[in-house]
Amino acid sequence: MDNRTKKGAGPKEGLTPLNRDEILIPVNPSYHKEERRKTLAEILKGHEADAFLFDSRTIKKKALIALLEDLSPQEQEAIHQLRPLTIELEEDLLEKIIELKEEINQLQAMALIDGLTGLYNNRFFSSQLEKEMARTRRTGLPCTLLIMDLDNFKTLNDTLGHLEGNHFLVAVAGVLRESLRTSDTICRFGGDEFTVIMPATNLYEAGRAADRLIKAVQVIAEPLGLGVSLSAGAGEYTATSSLSLNEFVQTTDSALYEAKRCGKNRLAFSGKAEPIPDETSMVSVEEKEALFALKEHLQQKGEDDDR
Amino acid sequence: MTAKVPVVTAISSGKGGVGKTFVAINLAACLAQIGKKVLMVDCDLGLANIDIMLGLNPTHTLKDIAFGNLTAKEVLLTTPGGFDLVPASSGVKEMAQLIFENIDRIKKAIQEISSDYDHIILDTGAGISETVLQFNLFADHNIIVLNRELTSLTDAYATIKVIFQMFGKNHFELIINSAHNTGEAIKIFNHLDSICHKFLGISLSYLGHISYDESVPRSIMKQSILSLAFPQSTPAQNCAAIARKMAEEFK
């Protein structure tokens, strides 16, 4: 039987299965309403299958999980041809569910992630800084904060337009991501201001990182020739520090102000004028072991001399 | 007369007490002896002592440059070693730690008079402070002085590592001070070179060694320059050899 023949004039009421191309599939021996329903009940008994049925009057789609029984091979074939259609429906549903789920995720993330750059936003920043400060008090390892601001960003916006300004902010975000460790939390504080929370990092190490960032921004800003650069303030929170979260942010922010005051495109520290590197953090255990092996070399040499 | 473009060399050690300033003074004097115009800048801000080692009593110092009061020319001294010196203020606590602004001023002041010289030698402080790092960044050549002590070796390595990682500088010249002999000096050099190669992926250059004998403490006691007071001594000869190498190779 040709199931691809469109049967436009069906009974006014009843269920009419259609295939993928919305062509009527003759699953019933009769088109009489009563018999047809009965047959359908029979059809849908005992077999696990999904039937995709159309009410011929309302053309309303319905998905049924049905059982099929006692069908001629032709009819079974017809039912099998229904399956892709029903699977399609399931996939549609699944897609819709995934879509909704993604939308929910996005909505949640939007509250924490900056829409333009994909960095964290200042809401996330506050909660994360609070966590890191608590971690410092517990572990004794200092955490550091960088607050950074683009110099002469307004000139860029005024000269090249806000779209180019936004492109540049995205590029800066990329530079920050590339130059920092995955353990660092990078946030866009709004406008052209960025912050970085560096766990288990002292002021010296943070200063080195900030220097890298300033140089990296120089590289991408130079071709613009608009005097755009990065200024940074660095602050350290230690286990003995009595600063509140706001005070920590404020003192670091005043270091940024100092950097701007001293001529921009530079780094300034809050607290210590010049952080001293922690020597133990500079030379690893492996390196020390290797260095100390010299002792044996020199002793050997001493023996040579004695001979 | 054409303006000269001087070679700027920073001399660092990481650790104090390895004879860095002694080496710097003698190299400056030896370079002057072979006809080079040399400016030495005492950047050892915490514990400046070149003036003391030379028996000088400066009225103005690097501090005046750092805070914008005087130019480098106004602070300059001529030393018995035949080279010019910008002295630092010894024991002035506030000088030990400079902010970038001050360091910038010093760099600019040096650049202003740089065309008068063939060589500018920066005697940096002990330790790995930002000031030391900044002067190393400023220099064309970075000499690291170490002796045969393990602490000196470790600090020399730490200095190299930080400068390399921070500024990407990958060329360091080593001077082994107070070595017993050439063999020992080369052994120390090879050891540090192999470690730098293994952990940092960079190779070091061996500039030379300076052996130790009685002439060294005697010259220091007399507040005179070894290369002038005992030119025939082995350490003075070693210094002269290194200076010749610098004159030839440092461009």
Image (cartoon, helix red, strand yellow):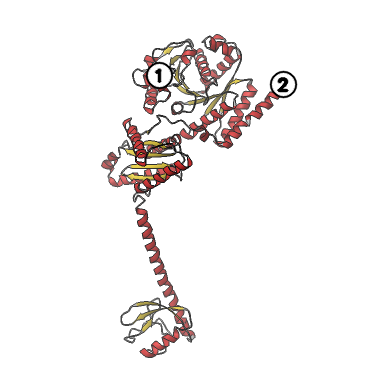
Q: Observer-nearest residue: B27 or A145?
A: A145
Q: Amino acid at mark 1?
A: Leu
User: Which quadrant of the figure has residue B70?
Assistant: top left
- Label 2, secondary structure: give it: helix
Q: Amino acid at mark 2?
A: Asp
Quarter the N terminus of chain B occupies:
top left
Q: Which mark is residue B62?
A: 1
Q: In this rendering, would B8 be left or right of A249?
A: right
Q: Observer-nearest residue: A38 or B194?
A: A38
Q: Is residue A2 above or below residue B14?
A: below
The residue that disc 2 covers is A306
Q: Residue at x 34, y 21 (%)?
A: B68
Q: Residues within 10 Å of mark 2 (few under 14, many from 20)?
A: few
What subunit carries mark 1? Answer: B
Name the spot of residue A118 as percent of width and height, x first.
37, 50
Q: In this rendering, would A301 be left or right of A82?
A: right
